[in-house]
C-alpha cells in the first residue's frame, strides 16, 4: 500500500488571487531551475490551471499512473488572513469529503479549519460526524500559533473523535515564526493522546528540528515539499531521511507530495520512485521503505 499523505484538490474560487500570485511567484524560479526552462509566472499559472479538479477525477488517474493507492486530501483555510474566498471553507471541505466518497478507497479527507472562526466547532463537528472526514489540517501562517490555548478545544475534540491533526510546518506567505516546529511540539506535549503531524516536516528551514521532535511518541512527519531539496542535493536528502529513521523510526515518517503545486516540479510518479527505488549508496531496508510509503499513514489514519 502506497499512500501520499499530503495532497490538495483545486477548484475555481477556492483561494484569493493574492495568494495564488504568491504561489506562482514562489514556484517559478524552482520550476525554471528544475526543468531548465525560462517560463513566466503567467505561463506557470496556465499550467497550474490544468490541475483544477474539484472531484479528484484527474487525480485518480495521476495516482494510478504513479502506482499510488491512496491520497490524504484537504484544503487550506486562509480566509482570516486573505479574506473569504468565493467558495467558503465549509464548501471546500464538503467537496473534499465528496471526492473521497466518489472514489471509494482512494482518499482520506481531512477538514481544513482555522480555530479562530466563530463557527469552527460547528464546522468541525459536521466534517467529522456527518461527512466522515478523518482529521484536521491547520495553517498557523494564517495568523495563529498552534499552541495558543484558543486552539485547545479542537485538540480535545480530536482526542474524543480519535482523529489526528496535521499542522503546517515550514515556509509560507506570512507569520513564518508561527510555523516553527517547537510550537507544534508544545501541542504534542500538552496532549500526549493526540497524534500530531508536522506537515512538510519543517522543509529545509527546520528539517533538523523536525526530525528530533518526531522522537516524541505522538509526533509524525510528512515530508511533502521536499522535492526541491532532493533535486538540489539528493545525497543530503537521503542523509536526512536515514538520520530521521535512525532517530525516530520509519514508523514516524510519511511519504507525501504536497500536490498539486509540487507536481509541476517533480511528478508524482518520479517522486514515489525517490523512496521506492532510491538512487543512493545510503541503505534503506524494504521494511523501512514500506513504512514510509504507506504503513505509517495507515497507522495514523486507521479505517
Image (cartoon, rainbow, N blue to C red):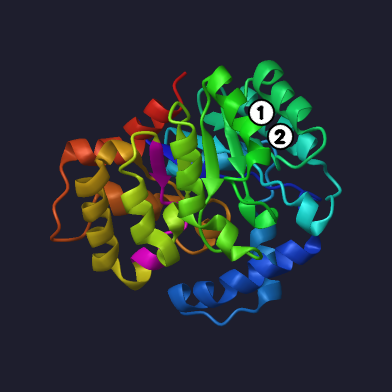
Q: Which residues are magenta?
A: 219-230
Between 282 and 248, the one lying in front of the other is 248
Q: Residue at x 34, y 60 (%)?
A: 208
Residue drawn at (79%, 35%), measured in percent from left and top? 91
C-alpha span from label 2 to label 1:
6 Å
In the rendered view, does 284 fall on the left or right side of 193?
left
Q: Residue 165, relative to residue 172: is it above or below?
A: above
Number of the label disc, if any, that sits on residue 97: 1
Residue 276 in the image: above or below residue 189: below
Residue 81 placement: quadrant: bottom right
In front of the other: 179 or 59: 179
Name the residue carrying label 2: 93
Query: How many other residues sit within 10 Å of disc 1, few (<14), some (14-19) or many (≥20)?
Result: many
x, y percentage for residue 260?
Answer: 57, 53
Closer-to-camera residue (253/179):
179
Specify whether residue 263 is in view: yes
Against 130, is 39 above or below?
A: below
Q: Position of residue 85 (x, y in %)?
A: 83, 50
Tell me which corner region of the image, top left, top right, bottom left or bottom right, holds residue 219.
top left
Screen quadrant of the N terminus: top left
Q: Is residue 129 left or right of residue 189?
A: right
- Residue in the picture at 31% in, 41% down: 292
Amino acid at each position: 500500500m502506497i499512500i501520499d499523505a499530503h495532497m490538495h484538490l483545486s477548484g475555481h474560487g477556492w483561494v484569493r488571487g493574492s495568494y495564488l500570485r504568491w504561489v506562482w511567484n514562489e514556484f517559478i524560479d524552482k520550476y525554471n531551475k528544475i526543468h531548465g526552462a525560462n517560463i513566466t509566472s503567467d505561463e506557470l499559472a496556465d499550467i497550474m490551471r490544468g490541475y483544477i479538479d474539484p472531484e479528484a477525477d484527474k487525480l485518480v488517474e495521476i495516482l494510478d499512473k504513479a502506482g499510488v493507492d491512496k491520497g490524504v486530501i484537504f484544503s487550506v483555510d486562509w480566509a482570516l488572513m486573505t479574506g473569504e474566498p468565493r467558495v467558503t471553507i465549509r464548501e471546500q471541505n464538503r467537496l473534499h469529503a465528496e471526492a473521497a466518497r466518489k472514489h471509494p478507497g482512494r482518499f482520506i479527507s481531512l477538514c481544513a479549519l482555522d480555530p479562530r472562526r466563530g463557527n469552527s466547532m460547528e464546522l468541525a463537528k459536521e466534517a467529522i460526524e456527518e461527512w466522515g472526514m478523518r482529521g484536521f489540517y491547520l495553517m498557523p501562517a494564517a495568523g495563529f500559533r498552534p499552541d495558543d490555548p484558543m486552539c485547545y478545544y479542537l485538540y480535545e475534540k480530536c482526542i474524543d473523535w480519535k482523529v489526528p491533526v496535521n499542522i503546517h510546518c515550514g515556509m509560507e506567505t506570512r507569520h513564518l515564526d508561527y510555523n516553527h516546529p517547537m510550537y507544534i511540539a508544545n501541542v504534542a506535549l500538552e496532549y500526549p493522546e493526540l497524534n500530531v503531524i508536522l506537515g512538510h516536516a519543517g522543509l529545509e528551514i527546520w528539517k533538523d528540528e523536525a526530525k528530533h521532535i518526531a522522537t516524541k511518541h505522538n509526533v509524525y512527519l510528512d515530508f511533502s515539499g521536499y522535492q526541491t531539496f532532493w533535486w538540489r542535493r539528493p545525497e543530503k536528502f537521503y542523509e536526512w531521511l536515514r538520520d530521521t529513521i535512525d532517530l525516530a523510526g520509519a514508523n514516524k515518517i510519511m511519504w507525501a507530495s504536497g500536490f498539486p503545486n509540487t507536481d509541476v516540479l517533480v511528478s508524482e510518479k518520479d517522486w514515489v520512485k525517490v523512496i521506492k527505488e532510491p538512487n543512493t549508496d545510503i541503505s534503506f531496508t524494504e521494511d523501512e521503505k514500506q513504512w514510509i510509503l504507506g504503513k505509517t499513514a495507515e497507522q495514523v489514519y486507521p479505517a
